[in-house]
Image (cartoon, rainbow, N blue to C red):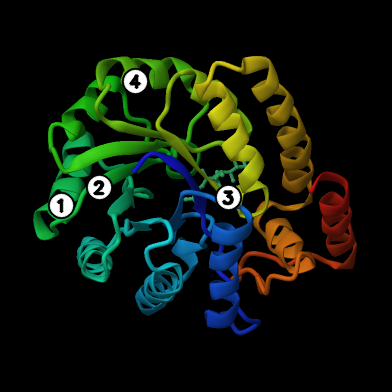
Amino acid sequence: MNGLYTALMCSFDEKGNVNEKGLREIVRHNIDVQQVDGLYVNGSTGENFLISKEQKKQIFDVVNNEAGNDVKLIAQVGALDLDEAVELATYATDLGYNAISAVTPFYYKFDFEEIKDYYNTILDSVDNDLIIYSIPALTGVNMNLEQFGELFKNEKVIGVKFTAPDFFLLERIRHAYPNKLIFSGFDEMLLSASVLNVDGAIGSTFNVNGRRAKQIYELAQKGQIDEARDVQKVTNDLIAEILDNGLYPTIKEILKYKGVDAGVCRKPMKSLDPEGVTNAQHIADKHL
Ligand code: NGF
């Protein structure tokens, strides 16, 4: 399961429906042009928390059908409705997804026993491996080394998608659990995470900048740190401008500019105004 995974965007039409043709184009663009090793489906970048259970299933289907066996597939199934999480985990597993992933339960202040029960409940119901999705900035859930260790005791928990700027904790997890997979989650920090020997990365900007991300990761693995730093610098020039203009709508606009029918974001996420569209096109011309 090592390697670089795109946190896959989904194409929606103006009414918020999944645009299947556009979604297929995004999948192909990531496989054929960005040449990533895998796709992380229905994560934050896929606007997972803005869509219905039926749409999540529809997206799992379409991506699986388009990608076939070309790349590895991870299905993010985490949901506050634990029955839904179990249903989605079963659905994606039956489709043949290589692993599932689940965001830590959020909004309510769950204690650690509740978080552990959430993961074990999902895993008891499916014959698949799971990657914890830890993203404290969005969930407010900050787990420590011991708590990760407690979740890792379940052998079906094979790793973590670590989306946090805490390199102390990242190094401690790497050192303590050499056999678990760690995926770096912040694209702008990929080199720093790669130096700490992560097993791969999952990122939103890989939808448009996947080849450079792979270069950073591979150069770091070979110990070519100066070269990797140069590619991270160019990457961060791009990411800084994408973040300034609005993360997901700008990535969609860049995809559209490249001929990929990426559609619009689901409300209440805003679309870009005409000035934002022009900015996105300038960003693409300048950096891609
Ligand atoms: O979009 C976010 C929110 N994080 C992504 C990524 O960690 C999310 C990251 O690539 C993800 O993998 C998913 O869709 O589930 C950032 O967009 C990127 O580093 C720019 O900051 O924090």
Q: Give percent across and percent down for residue 177.
A: 25, 22
Split into 4 quadrants, where in the image is the N terminus? top left
Disc 3 residue: CB within 8 Å of ligand 1: yes
Contact flag, marks 3 and 2 (Cβ < 8 Å):
no
Residue 160 placement: quadrant: top left
Identify the residue at horizontal 22%, vertical 60% (top origin). 82
Q: Residues within 10 Å of mark 1 (few under 14, many from 20)?
A: many
Q: Amino acid at mark 4?
A: Arg
Tag 3 residue: 204
Q: Amino acid at mark 3?
A: Ser
Q: Is residue 240 above or below residue 228?
A: below
Q: Is residue 13 above or below residue 159?
A: below
Q: Secondary structure at mark 2?
A: strand
Tag 1 residue: 123
Q: Secondary structure at mark 4?
A: helix
Per the model, the C-alpha gap separating discs 1 and 4 is 23 Å
Q: Is residue 37 above or below residue 49?
A: above
Identify the residue at horizontal 44%, vertical 36% (top origin). 200
Q: Is residue 189 left or right of residue 154?
A: right
Contact flag, marks 2 and 1 (Cβ < 8 Å):
yes
Q: Give percent across and percent down for residue 56.
A: 39, 71
Per the model, the C-alpha gap separating discs 4 and 3 is 23 Å
Contact flag, marks 1 and 3 (Cβ < 8 Å):
no
Tag 4 residue: 174
Per the model, the C-alpha gap separating discs 2 and 1 is 7 Å
Looking at the image, tell me whether mark 3 or mark 2 is earlier in sequence order: 2
Q: Give percent across and percent down for residue 79.
A: 32, 59
